[in-house]
Image (cartoon, rainbow, N blue to C red):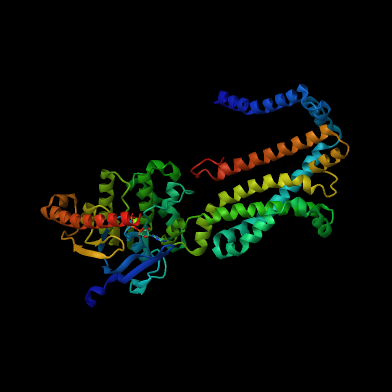
Amino acid sequence: MKADGVKRILLGAIPWLGAIALWYVVRWSGIVNPSLIPAPHAVAMKFVELLLHEGLLVDVWASTQRVTLGVLLGIAAAVPVGFLLGWYRPARTFADPMINFFRALPPIALIPLVIVYFGVDEMAKLVVLFYAAFFSGVIVMYEGVSQITPLYIRVAQTLGASELEIFRKVIIPLTVPHILTALRVALGVAWATLVASELIAAQRGLGALIQNASTYFLLDVIYVGIICIGFVALVMDMILRAISKRLLVWQERAVA
Amino acid sequence: MTNDANKNARAQFEHVSLAFDTPRGKLQIVDDVNYSISDGDFIAVIGPSGCGKTTMMNMLAGFQKPTGGRVLFDNAPVQGPGPERGVIFQEYGVFPWLTVRQNIAFGLTLHANRVAPGEREAICDHYLSLMGLSDFANSFPKHLSGGMRQRLAIARAYAVKPQFLLMDEPFGALDAQTRANMQNLLLQVLAAEGKTVMLITHSVEEAIYLASRIVVVTARPARIKEIIEVPFPYPRDESIHERPEFGQLRSYIRELVMNEYRAQQAQSSFSE
Ligand SMILES: Nc1ncnc2c1ncn2[C@@H]1O[C@H](COP(=O)(O)OP(=O)(O)OP(=O)(O)O)[C@@H](O)[C@H]1O
Ligand SMILES: [Mg+2]
């Protein structure tokens, strides 16, 4: 049991060690000008320095908070909308082109407009993240809900379930997996949009950190910022996966 | 059909037809089907695969409206599904998100047939052991074999005690021995609770052993080929399999059914 755990951790660590090794190789091989690639240990030192003296945690927290809030609000809106679209075919035929139009717009292209209408405050960043989360979540929800087979509803009807009971006891359990998938997809998209949203005059946040560093060409700081984003996103995804695993023990295939 | 026969009819097919709209035009599935099921009847429907048996049952269950004629239940046109018509689906429809026990209990937690929690557990235990699922009471359906899922679907339908049972090949996935057990159990339940049944099957023996009347339907579109009265009184036991009349009836129905299977096969090779 214990040996198994150790083995898994080791296996999980190999690709990371490999990536760091590759990083050193690229730097030392001279393919790229070494001054353009900070060494891993230099980035690690920068990380510690930022953590201790520059309040890196404040940035991490600011970004995590924005992403979480944007995703929660976006999904809170996407679940009912996606559900309606998936459930009522006519609603889909009429809303589908519109949804796909807005979904195809990269959030970054909206930033000038967002600044005009929402200013440069926290609200503006939230709007961009909400937008990204909502449209990615809606698609997942309605694709999922539209694939629910009528069989289970029929079974419930023949056992005497009322409309409300069918909703509570059949449709909700069948929708939960799609809500969780929508959350995971939206989280991914929201982290990807974060830097863009923090282009809007952010003081703090990982996106802001990267923006500011790029003005002064502080490559090591940029690396720290990028790695932090990836790391926090990974942790959040792992948490969601753990929750999915608990809620969806009944599912045929394990949630990947 | 005389009015007398209609008096205690629970379900009636009155010149029922059904056609689906397909990309290749109208597809006639059920054609002018006319028969009635009286209270306490046990009807077995037998006919080739794809001929329209499930479609016929769906109209009585309330999932599909006939495009011609009427389907009546208790003398009123069927409007939709209801708990007085229990259905065992060909695809089982076991709820994957509920454990075996929760599946059986599902109907009993609904407002329409709610019972006290103590009684609910007792009913669940009863069917768990009858269906040989006690060891899997707390497993999810993904851990069950096909035959176990089928038994679970049967238990779930029996648990709410519908007066009218619609069973679509309910024993199809079971081995011969379990199948015989399930048939006997069904006969016991009927003797105790006096249900009316419409059973779809591909097994001529099963139809004769269980049913009071056998409806043989034709290759698609489903029409009634012949309705055969089964002469054995209830209660029945397995010894009727040995009776000479059983053998005669079996040969007779086999012959009818085989003809339709051949017709259906010819039809499908045409349409390829
Ligand atoms: N919604 C539908 N649209 C078009 N055709 C359909 C539809 N549902 C069923 N059919 C067709 O109706 C025919 C009869 O189907 P049905 O399920 O009633 O057959 P069955 O007699 O129950 O067969 P089996 O013994 O294989 O279960 C089939 O040929 C099927 O392709
Ligand atoms: Mg069928």
Q: Which residue sits at x=31%, y=49%?
A: B172
Looking at the image, is B241 positioned above or below residue A159? above
Q: Position of residue A105 (x, y in %)?
A: 71, 54
Q: How many marks?
A: 0
Q: Position of residue A87 (x, y in %)?
A: 55, 60
Q: Quadrant of ligand 2?
A: bottom left
Looking at the image, is A48 positioned above or below residue A149? above
Q: Which residue sits at x=61%, y=54%?
A: A139
Q: Give whichever of A171, A25 is nearer the camera.
A: A25
A66 left or right of B213? right
B50 left or right of A91? left
Q: Give whichever of A155, B255 is nearer the camera.
A: B255
Q: Position of residue B199 (x, y in %)?
A: 29, 58
Residue B40 in view here: no
Question: In which quarter of the view is residue B221 placed?
Answer: bottom left
Give the quadrant of the C terminus of chain A.
top right
Q: Position of residue B3 (x, y in %)?
A: 24, 77
Which residue in the rendered view is the most extreme toward the right? A216
Q: Give whichever of A24, B72 is nearer the camera.
A: A24
Which residue in the rendered view is the most extreme toward the bottom? B3
Q: Give whichever of A236, B86 is nearer the camera.
A: A236
Q: Which residue sits at x=23%, y=59%?
A: B211
Give the quadrant of the N terminus of chain A.
top right
A228 left or right of A5? right
Q: Which residue sits at x=79%, y=26%?
A: A39
Residue A237 in view here: yes
